[in-house]
């Protein structure tokens, strides 16, 4: 079972396990569970606005209280899949060890994340170490990469430390969305504007302090 839930505003904000949209289908079909023992997709509560408001760019408020370590929640914002991933301690500790294999390990390209993300932690690219929020579209030609989050040898990388693999043209990103060197994707995955209103609530589409 895929270790994630998908929220589609066209379903009134209820988790969608059918993957009706193309990018959601690709993502849910390709992603494997992270760590054994998570038998069920968590129930995710959200307060999404209408589909029309979504397309216009309305913020999306997401309750992540049920999100377990190693799981990914996918919501839609401005017609894009937004990944919210809870990273393990092992994944977090592995990220800085990858810097010399990456194109932009310190998040120096200001177009790929808000300034407060680069300032908070340029290697983790997140406001909280464990919670990563990314736009789930490859920066090469826009395919939806697969999450391959376990630290173990993979056919495409014998030293894999977890991350995202785009099967379209074999681009690789780490668990912070940082792109590897020598792949077609030119830049790190986008981090959307977002902030926490409390420990378990994220608003995607609004910068901290701008609400
Ligand atoms: S679209 Fe991802 S590598 Fe080409």
Image: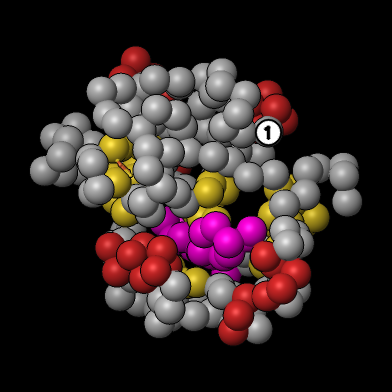
Q: Is mark 1 within 8 Å of ligand 1?
A: no
Q: Position of residue 3 (x, y in %)?
A: 38, 68
Quadrant of residue 48 within the rendered picture: bottom right
What residue lies at 47% left-to-right and 51% top-to-bottom? 136
Placement of 64 over or under 157, stated as above or below: below
Placement of 206 over or under 172, stated as above or below: below
Quarter of the image where ligand 1 sits = top left
Q: Is residue 82 left or right of residue 33?
A: right
Q: Which residue is mark 1?
A: 114
Q: Residues within 10 Å of mark 1 (few under 14, many from 20)?
A: some
Is residue 79 in the magenta section?
yes
How did the renderer colour the structure? secondary structure
Q: Position of residue 16 (x, y in %)?
A: 49, 80
Q: Position of residue 146 (x, y in %)?
A: 32, 54
Q: Is residue 81 left or right of residue 29?
A: right
- Whether residue 21 is visible to the viewer of this picture, yes or no, is yes
What residue lies at 77% left-to-right and 49% top-to-bottom? 206
- Whether residue 86 is visible to the viewer of this picture, yes or no, is no
Is residue 203 in the magenta section?
no
Q: Nearer the viewer, residue 71 or 81?
A: 81
Q: Nearer the viewer, residue 11 or 90?
A: 11
Give, as a single range, the part of the protein colored magenta: 66-81
Q: Nearer the viewer, residue 3 or 186?
A: 186
Placement of 16 over or under 167, stated as above or below: below
What residue lies at 57% left-to-right and 48% top-to-bottom? 133
Placement of 205 over or under 62, stated as above or below: above
Q: Secondary structure at mark 1?
A: loop
What residue lies at 60% left-to-right and 80% top-to-bottom? 10
């Amino acid at each position: 079972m895929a270790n994630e839930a998908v929220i589609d505003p066209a379903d009134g904000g209820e988790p969608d396990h059918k993957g009706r949209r193309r990018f959601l289908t690709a993502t849910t079909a390709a992603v494997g569970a992270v760590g054994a023992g998570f038998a069920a997709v968590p129930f995710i509560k959200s307060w999404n606005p209408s589909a029309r408001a979504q397309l216009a760019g309305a913020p999306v408020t997401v309750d992540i209280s049920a999100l377990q370590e190693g799981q990914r929640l996918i919501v839609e914002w401005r017609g894009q899949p937004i990944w919210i991933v809870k990273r393990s301690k092992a994944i977090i500790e592995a990220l800085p060890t990858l810097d010399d294999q990456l194109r932009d390990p310190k998040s120096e390209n200001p177009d790929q994340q808000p300034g407060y993300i680069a300032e908070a932690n340029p290697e983790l690219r997140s406001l909280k170490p464990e919670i990563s929020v990314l736009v789930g579209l490859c920066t090469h030609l826009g395919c939806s990469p697969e999450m391959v989050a376990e630290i173990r040898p993979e056919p495409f990388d014998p030293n894999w430390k977890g991350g995202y693999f785009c099967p379209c043209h074999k681009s690789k990103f780490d668990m912070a969305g940082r792109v590897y060197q020598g792949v077609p994707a030119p830049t790190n995955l986008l981090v959307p504007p977002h902030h926490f209103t409390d420990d378990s609530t994220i608003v995607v589409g609004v910068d901290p302090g701008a609400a």
